[in-house]
Image: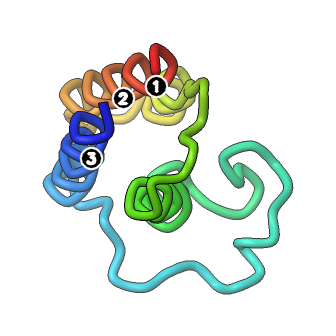
Amino acid sequence: MRTQIAALMMDVEAHLRQLGLWESEPPPDEAFASTQPFFIDTMSLPQWLQFVFLPTMQRLLEEEADLPTACGIAPMAEEHFRGTALPVAELLLVLERLDETITQG
């Protein structure tokens, strides 16, 4: 399962890069102090994926620590990208697979 999660995380990064949503600089430090889900008040969803979710999951995988028992990123991503012209269908599918893999543990 951990190998599958790692592969899906690499797919998320690849899709963010292909869509031009991968940023070279992180948000300001204050953005990381958010207490809201997905840091919705301080970051865009792609920023949260890049600077919070992916690094946190990578650290958990590397440390062989307990992984979350539930994940629900895909519905948030669907809402975030609704009405945009970006071709996000493949990214959404990868996020759905990631949600399922983590939740099914």
Residue at left offset 30%, top offset 66%: 22
**Nearest to N terminus: mark 1 or mark 2:** 1
| 46 relative to 81, above or below | below
Quadrant of image for the N terminus: top left
Residue annotated with mark 3 = 6
Q: From the top left corner, tell me how far across and down residue 36 is, in percent.
A: 81, 49
**Nearest to N terminus: mark 3 or mark 1:** 3
Residue at left offset 55%, top offset 62%: 52
**Nearest to N terminus: mark 2 or mark 3:** 3
| Amino acid type at mark 2 | Leu
Q: Quadrant of residue 20?
A: bottom left
Q: Residues within 10 Å of mark 2 (few under 14, many from 20)?
A: many
- SS type, badge 2: helix
Residue annotated with mark 2 = 98
- SS type, badge 1: helix
Residue at left offset 31%, top offset 21%: 97
Q: From the top left corner, tell me how far across and down residue 6 is, in percent.
A: 27, 47
- The reply to whether the C-beta atoms of the residues labelled 1 and 2 are less than 8 Å apart is yes
| 50 relative to 103, above or below | below
| Amino acid type at mark 1 | Ala
Q: Quadrant of residue 25?
A: bottom left
Q: Nearer the viewer, mark 2 or mark 3?
A: 3
Q: Residues within 10 Å of mark 1 (few under 14, many from 20)?
A: some
| C-alpha separation, residue under disc 1 versus residue under disc 2 | 8 Å
Q: From the top left corner, tell me how far across and down residue 88 is, in percent.
A: 26, 33
- SS type, badge 3: helix
Residue annotated with mark 1 = 74
Question: How has the structure been colored for display?
Answer: rainbow
